[in-house]
Each structure stands twice: as C-alpha cells, then as structure tokens.
Image (cartoon, rainbow, N blue to C red):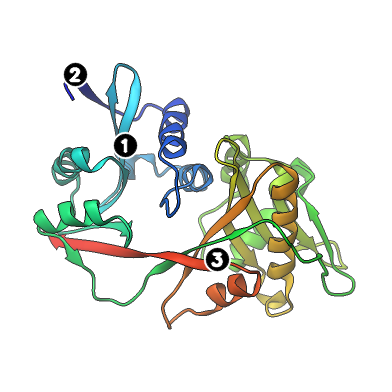
Amino acid sequence: MSDITTRPYRGPEDLRRMQELVQAVWGPGSRCHVGELAWDRFQHLGREPEWPTMLWEHRGRTLAWAWVRLPGGLQFVAPDDLADEVLDWFHETTTGDRLATTILDTETGLADVLTRRGYRPAQDGSFLLRMSRSLDGLDEVEPPPGFTVRHLRGEEDVPERVAAHRSAFHPSRVTEDSYRRVMRAWPYRSDLDCVVEAPDGRLVAYCLAWLDPDNRVGQFEPVGTRREFQRLGLARAACLYAMHRLRAAGAGEAVVYARGDAAHPGPAALYRSLGFRADARTVTYTRSR
C-alpha cells in the first residue's frame, strides 16, 4: 500500500487511535485488548521517555503501532505485511543488546517474520496463558463472612485502592496520582473496578475489568489481594463479581492473561476454577543486536 506515513505518539488522543486498531482487528485469540493498553500506558507516571511509540497511518487511518520499552522490549499490533517495517524501526530505536517481543503461538505469520529476521523463541520457560470464558451461567458471588464485594465509589476510594494494589504487587510504582490518571482514561469505568472490603473498611482485593463495547469483550487487568488476606477466596469473589458487572454492561465474554508455567501456577488455577479455559499462550522471541 502506498502513501503510508509514520509519526511518533503525541498523547492520549493517539492511544485512542491505537485502541481503535485493536478493536478493529479483534477476533478469537487476539493478543491485545483496549483495557490492557490503557492500564499499561497510565499506571505509572514519568516513564514516557522510556517508551518510544510510533504509528503507521494511511489517509488518517491507523494501520499499525509499535511501543518500545527501553532498552530492548517491543509491543506492537501490525498486519504481517507491515511487520518488517515495524521491526526496522524497533532496531533503529532501541538501545539494548538483547531485543525481545512477545506474540501468541497462534500468530504464525508474525512468527515466520520474526524467525526470518533472526529471532528465536526464548528458553527461560516462563509464559502467559490467554484464557477466556463466556459470561453465561455465572455462579453467585459469595464472599467470606464479614467481607463485602462492591465497585469503586470514586475519589474517596483511591487511597485504599492503591494501597491494595501496592501490597499485592510489591514493589509497585503505582501511586494515587497515577491511578487517578488510569481512572480518566478510556474505557475505564468505576462500576467495573471491583473491590472486596474487609470488616474494618480496608479494600483488600480487587479485579479491574475493562470493557471493549464494540466487541463485547471484557478483560481483567490487574487482579490482586493484599498479602495478609491471600488464600481466603477474595480474588475469586472480586473476579466473579466483575463478570456479573461485565455481563450487565453488555459483554458476552471475558479474557485474562495468567502465568502458565510451573513456577507460578496460582493465577491460572484461580481462573480455571472460575470457568476460564486457555486458548493460546505467549511466546517471547529474542535476538541479540
């Protein structure tokens, strides 16, 4: 295709263009969801200089985008026939000696391009499962006695919501200010930011659900429990509540990524208990400069 132009990312308006492409190419086994993009872009403050990002456009329509995480990581969405251009830009932009990008094992066309360009599957053994389930036939939400499952009420919940995240993912760079930025991003909805409240009023577990309204697909990103409240079934209650909320909002399916290797089996076991089934897995391709 002629007349393809490239330009750098300019701000949140361009994130919407990236999300629109993700929506347009969504299908069974898709790798990227609009909610994941919003969470990844806004959960931290001050990291933009580490994230060179480029858009490929044709007559105002976004055809591909690529997001580098310096020194040597690449996330991208592109048709197979633009993948070489994306990789050329990545190789010119990155500063690392080890280059890496992650795709799904179902993306055989991209795998062929990467192999031709000298990339090989990493051998460290870690990977994520893409897991999904229909939102029909959901169990009832039954938190442990004394705990309440609800959605975020608003600004007054931010300090506790962030404290729960920072405990679950310690050490974490998420702050109250960065979380407020997440809350301002499309397609964040406070009624899909599902939390578990302890008897003492603390928020102790959560499932942040994101809805792609065009494709009627929700994603969990992230899910967590404060360390001292783990193994009580609280994350399960939050996820199940989130699925009910997603279904009420019009979704027909939920997806989540979970570690699939033996070193970290807990999340996948949780989602299997909720009716999720794996339909693909990630493969990280690497090469040296």
Secondary structure of the residue carrying tag 3 is loop
Q: Do the numbered discs 2 and 1 sit on residues whose CB atoms are within 8 Å?
A: no
Residue 16 appears at what percent x and percent y? 47, 30
Is residue 125 found left or right of 153 in the rendered image?
Answer: left
Q: Amino acid at mark 2?
A: Asp
Residue 57 appears at what percent x and percent y? 29, 25
Residue located 44% across and 43% down the image: 26
Residue located 73% across and 62% down the image: 137
* Residue to which mark 1 is pinned: 65
Residue located 48% across and 46% down the image: 33
Earlier along the polypeptide chain: callout 1 or callout 3? 1
- Of the 4 image quadrants, the one containing the N terminus is top left
- Of the 4 image quadrants, the one containing the C terminus is bottom left
Secondary structure of the residue carrying tag 1 is strand
* Residue to which mark 3 is pinned: 169
Disc 1 versus disc 3: nearer the observer:
1
Is residue 39 found left or right of 1 in the rendered image?
Answer: right
Taking the image as drawn, is residue 158 in sight? Answer: no
Residue 235 appears at what percent x and percent y? 68, 68
Q: Amino acid at mark 1?
A: Trp
* Residue to which mark 2 is pinned: 3
Q: Residues within 10 Å of mark 2 (few under 14, many from 20)?
A: few
Q: Amino acid at mark 3?
A: Phe
Residue 53 position by quadrant = top left
The vertical placement of 18 against 123, above or below, is above
Secondary structure of the residue carrying tag 2 is loop
Q: Residues within 10 Å of mark 3 (few under 14, many from 20)?
A: some
Q: Residues within 10 Å of mark 1 (few under 14, many from 20)?
A: many
| In-front residue for pair 69/278 | 278
